Image (cartoon, rainbow, N blue to C red):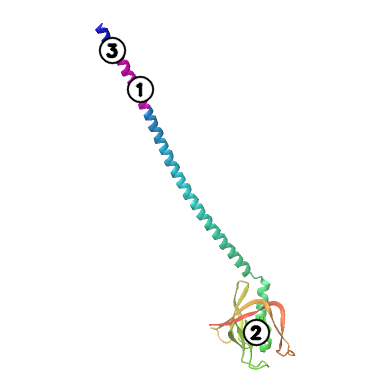
Amino acid sequence: MKKGFKTYTFIILLVLATIFVLDYLDISRLVNNLQNDKNSLIEKTSRLEKQNQKSSTETEQLQNENKQLVEQISQLEEEVKELKSSFIQYQDLNDAISTVNSYKAAKTFFQANNYIAFDGTGTVSYSSLDFEGNCPCFFNFDGLGFEWKPNVVGNLNEFRTEKGKIILIFNSVQNEHTAYQFIMTKATGLKENKSSPSGFDLDKEEKWRILEIKKLK
């Protein structure tokens, strides 16, 4: 009977050991699966963080590029606006040159005044030795005096446009190292009228006239 009891006890212990081993294996497998899931989640989290960081960087880059594009567009618009304001048609250039040629041909200071821009604001004015127009005679452009003398302006040497104005450079008849710069603009002016007390009447017609003359060396 003792032998049978021992055998029975051994069988019970074996069954318990087997159950314990099987439970251990199940628990180990479960732990391993959980660890794998954890590692997978860590990898996914890391990948998402990198993607998010990359996305943030790309978003910042796009914002900077967009800002630069806006600035470039604004700059281009200003350049186009400036080009439009600087654009002068051939007829305008021809008229401006014709005005200076008429100024060159003037025999008296009164005649020369016909080609000067004048709006009564004092930006451009004139003066002479007396009311008869005897010289020395001067044009005053923004406070800078320019002495008028006949037959000193030669041929056209250079021209350019600048913000709706035309700049004409003429050689000097007297000195090859000297030139005269004429800044031309569309404006009202004066016209000679000998019966007027001032010798002039206001010419309200806007056409290409001389805004400034400067002697260049």
Residue at 62 percent of width and 74 percent of height: 165
Q: Which residues are magenta?
A: 8-29
Residue at 69 percent of width and 77 percent of height: 207
Amino acid at dot 3: Thr
Residue annotated with mark 3: 9
Q: Is residue 27 magenta?
A: yes
Helix, strand or loop at label 3? It is helix
Judged from this view, the residue extending furthest toward the left is 2
Question: Disc number at residue 104?
Answer: 2
Q: Earlier in the sequence, mark 1 or mark 2?
A: 1
Image coords of residue 22 (percent x, y) = 35, 21
Relative vertical location of residue 137 with respect to residue 71 in this rendering, above or below: below
Image coords of residue 59 (percent x, y) = 50, 50
Q: Nearer the viewer, residue 3 or 192?
A: 3
Judged from this view, the residue extending furthest toward the right is 195
Q: Are marks 1 and 2 in contact (CB under 8 Å)?
A: no
- Name the image quarter holding the N terminus: top left
- Measured in 3D between alpha carbons, the distance from the residue under mark 1 to the one under mark 3, in whole angstroms, is 21 Å
* Of marks 1 and 3, the one in the foreground: 3
Relative vertical location of residue 192 with respect to residue 35 in this rendering, above or below: below
Image coords of residue 176 (percent x, y) = 55, 84
| Crowding at mark 3 (Cα within 10 Å: few <14, some 14-19, many 20+) | few
Q: Quadrant of residue 75?
A: bottom right
Q: Are marks 3 and 2 in contact (CB under 8 Å)?
A: no
Q: Nearer the viewer, residue 99 or 174?
A: 99
Is 169 displayed left or right of 39 in the figure?
A: right
Amino acid at dot 2: Lys
* Of marks 1 and 2, the one in the foreground: 1
